[in-house]
Amino acid sequence: MMNLSKKRRLQENLGSYMFLVPWLIGFFLLTLYPMGYSLYLSFTRFNIRTPPQWIGLNNYLVMFKGTETLSRDERFLNSMWVTFRFVFISVPVKLVFALVVAMLMNKKLRLIGLYRALYYIPTLLGGSVAIAVLWRRLFASDGLLNMILHTIFGLTNLPAWISNPTYALYTLILLAVWQFGSPMIIFLAGLQQIPREYYEASAVDGAGPIRQFFAITLPSLSPIIFFNFVMQMISAFQSFTQAFIVSGGSGGPLDSTMFYSLYLYIKGFGFSEMGYASAMAWVLLIIIAVLTAISFKSSGTLVSYGSGE
Amino acid sequence: MNRKQTDLAKRLVLNLFIIALALGMLYPILWLLGASFKPSNRIFTEVSIWPSVATLDNYREGWRGIGIVGFDTFFKNSFVICILSALANAIFCSLTAFAFARLKFKGKNLWFALMMITLMLPSHVTTIPRYIMFRRMGWINTFLPIVVPKFFATDAFFIFLLVQFIRGLPRDIDESATIDGCSKFGIYTRIIMPLTVPALITTLLFSFLWTWDDFFNQLLYLTSPNKYTVPMGLRLFLDSSGMSSWGPMFAMSVLSLIPAFILFFSLQKYFVRGIATTGIKG
């Protein structure tokens, strides 16, 4: 009897695991094993043609302080600086914009469905190579922006935004902010959850729209703002296509658009320094993990999850 | 009466403001569309969206592509990769999601937690070993490195999306089916699958679009122009042509955006659902 039920339970488990087989194979072969292997490679010098050579912490040392034979990789530190600026400027600006538009899209208007669709279009198309190519033309010295500034506003001596190291990164930030559609939709879903009575009651007490925004809307949305921030931050750190196309694959001018992912690609597949690129991948993983953990830690004080009535 | 009028005026102003802002935002895309019909020598002298002289030459010339490979090849390759990826994602992510959402087995919580961690993992940590692995298998310059991982449910986003959806379905239907002697696979194919159609459409949709724009993997694995996809074709165009061919470049850019456009406007509600339930990147 006991044996029978044990056998049954085993069968039950086995039957369930059959559904998980594809995912399990993928998890071990395409995620876990590659992760372990890239961790190992990060301690080696490896150009794919000859076997990996163990060099201990050298790759990591080169990134941050240099070794006896090799000086510090300033291009790496620059790519980190460029990426941090990109992430921590584009994400907050994008979220503010997404929230403002979401509040507009929360109004009861006849054409609101159409408006919501229109505001999502940049997000729908913005990740493509086609839009990156367009961006390159918009901000070129003889591009659309300068054409407008010249013919309509009569300005001359305009910079070539995309090939000017001071401005190039900002064109990419603008491109990222322009794709605010996903956080907008999530904010909108959040706004629709806030009970109308809150606003009505506060209006009776004489609160104006600004007061209501800071006393009701913002606190109610804080978990969603936090969620959007973390998700957007994680994906912004990994941006690649836009910088690759806009800079023609170089990260230029003067490495001013050298995103972390782009430098990793250039190191790993341009220079065949796969050990170094693997080390970079692990540093990125750690940066993202630490920043996510910090966000979660600080969310305790900044985010209100309601009183849970 | 007066109050009604001010209300109406407020509404009008609000509508106008929203439309103006939308037009400002969409201006680059509209300009691109207009430019694709302008003769090449006018593209960078006209600020207006509407072409003063319209021509289809850009489309004709662009479609011919580069060298011996035309854009028809790039489009065909993109469609093959995207359709296979979308189908594989829908089937294998939903199998996995069904197990996580409905079945009981030892170690479920551990596997589920691991799956959720892969959701946050930057793909860079697996890129190089996967490249080495696929290279050893002779898969470089084939579609396999892009498509095959989808047969192993590696896109955790869709597993999560489908788990959330299946959890929302009432349990009593599949419980009564179990009592009636329906097998697990039967419950999956006959009960859960049909009920998850909306979430499956969302999965198909996003898989298709993300694979279409997945430039990084295409750049890594596709090495000869006859295997190139549309984004790779555009990039080839960009690199190998001078100022003179912006017209054809823009025309092909417009074509490359059309599938996304059609899918978006025909399946809009699935978009909103997908984004709202998982908060996917964008």
Image (tube, coloured by chain):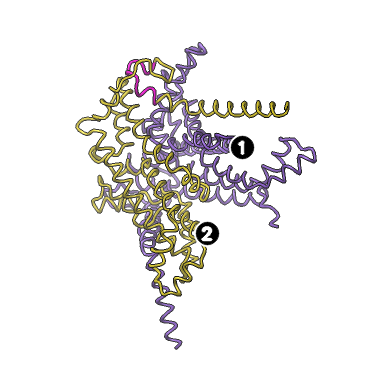
Chain colours: A purple, B yellow
Judged left or right of residue B149, residue A309 is: right
Q: Look at 40% across and 24% down and name the residue there.
A: A137
Q: Which residue is mark 1?
A: A108
Type of amino acid at the residue the image marks with label 1? Lys
User: Can residue B40 be found in the magenta stretch?
Assistant: yes
Q: Nearer the viewer, mark 2 or mark 1?
A: 1
Dot 2 falls on a residue whose secondary structure is: loop
- Over which residues does the magenta segment extend? B33-44
Tell me where residue B130 appears, x and y as whole percent: 33, 52
**Residue B6 sits in which quadrant?**
top right
Q: How far apart in space, not on screen, are marks 2 and 1 (Cα)?
A: 29 Å
- The residue lying furthest to the left in this view is B68
**Label 2: how many residues lie within 10 Å, few (<14), some (14-19) or many (20+)?**
few
Q: Nearer the viewer, residue B59 or A63?
A: B59
Give the chain of mark 2.
Answer: B
Tell me where residue B2 appears, x and y as whole percent: 73, 26
**Residue B209 sits in which quadrant?**
top left
Tell me where residue A21 appears, x and y as whole percent: 37, 64
Q: Look at 37% across and 35% down and name the residue there.
A: B258
